[in-house]
Image (cartoon, coloured by chain):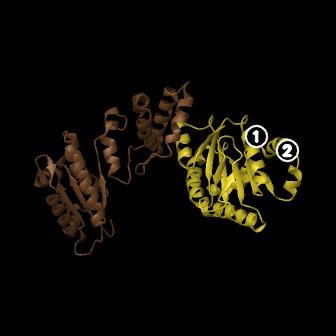
Chain colours: A brown, B yellow
Amino acid sequence: MKRESLIIVATESHWDIISSRLTHKGFDIEELRRHGQLTVLDADATLPKFMDNDMPDARTFKGIAGATIEKARAAGRYPRVRWWGEMVNILYVDGNSPGSIRLEELFDQVAHEESIAIFCSFLMDKFDRQIYDGPLQNVCRTHAHLIPAENYERHRECVDRAVAEVFSGIEDEFLDCLASAKKWSGPEMPTAQALLLWLKESTPYLADRVLELADHYEQEYKATTDTWS
Amino acid sequence: MSYITECGIPDIGKAPWGSHFCQLCTPRQNLPESLAPYFVAGLRNRERCIWLTSNLYEAKNAEADLRRVLPELDSMMEAERIQIRNCDEWYAGVLRSPHEQVLDRWVKEEQKALNEGNEGLRIAVNMTAVARPDWDAFMAYEKAAHSAFMARRIVALCSYSLAKCRATDIFEVVRTHHFTVRA
């Protein structure tokens, strides 16, 4: 945070957690806000300002985003700005997928136009089959990087175990499918996540089974670690 | 100089210079069968060849297998048309030094090949001995090699053992090479 300004658009409950973590790490929230290095907006209160009939109004949204970014730059004191927000997630969780996708697209445009880094968080279970029916692909379409799990190694292990079990006895089928793996493209993400998305495209039925098993292995792992901790 | 070269591998035919492809195989049984014709094709096309083997299929075994289909192997080795070595020593530096240093070594070998009047450099590397903790470093190296070889008169074939690779490993390997051959 030396030469960067931070914009946080969070729900009230999340901001409470974030601010206490920042304080715990030694940051003086009020001082950061006073210096203009930290801008905090309430996600629930900001959304209605640019939503029009369940869809974001591009002009109003870009106006609000632009003004917030300009203020965050503090007349050039902070040339770099990073934005973390969860307004898209609020729409997604509320079941407003079209609005969520549109807002994501607008954020993507703002990131390019304003040259800022935008970090979005979504309430999605990486092994939930439903998110592979479009929502996760939409997220991938408008982001450069995807962080699907806290523990990449564990994630990979669960996926590997699940694939090995589902394709046991039909390994050739997996290898045959791989011809299309070369062409699959998406944002930067861990290999295990890329494999899941590619599998969903190439063998949807088996992908569902892989997701189910991977989830099972993760629960199994969590149960083991909970027992020992 | 042609922009393509005969691969020597059944069903592949010719491949452009700069091709960096992988072979998914079982540890021992299929390697000589597919790699011997790969090198025979290269030597017949006046290419300089380097075969890096692993401890699962050592250089002396590779030499013996290749000699069976290429009786003139000894004289070719003497003339440095082909080198067969264990990959451990070659790649020892990959994990400790920047990728550029290892890639630079390949480029120097390519330059040597061309300066000696060869068509290019043909490489085969047996990756079956890559240890699990080294995997990520090797994949990063593979990505760098993929880009570095693209504009050069180098063809490179990397062999991976299906028995040692997990699903995500195979997915990664396939995506870091131009095409995949199944042995």
The foreground one among A115 and B2 is B2
**At x 44% / y 43%, what residue is drawn?**
A194
The residue at the point 69 percent across, 36 percent down is B27
Q: Which residue is mark 1?
A: B32
Mark 2 / mark 1, whichever is N-terminal: 1
Amino acid marked by disc 2: Arg
Tell whether label 1 touches label 2 (CB within 8 Å).
no
Q: Taking B4 as reference, is B175 above or below it?
A: above
Residue A185 in the image: state x and y as whole percent.
Answer: 43, 48
- For badge 1, the amino acid type reads Pro
Which quarter of the figure is the C terminus of chain A placed in? top left
Residue under the image location 85 percent in, 41 percent down: B68
**Relative to residue A135, is residue A170 depicted above or below?**
above
Residue B161 lies left or right of residue B117; in this view the side is left
Mark 2 vs mark 1, CA separation in Å: 11 Å
Tell me the residue that label 2 is attached to.
Answer: B67
Q: Give the quadrant of the N terminus of chain A.
A: bottom left
Q: SS at mark 2?
A: helix
The answer to whether one can see residue A162 in this image is: yes
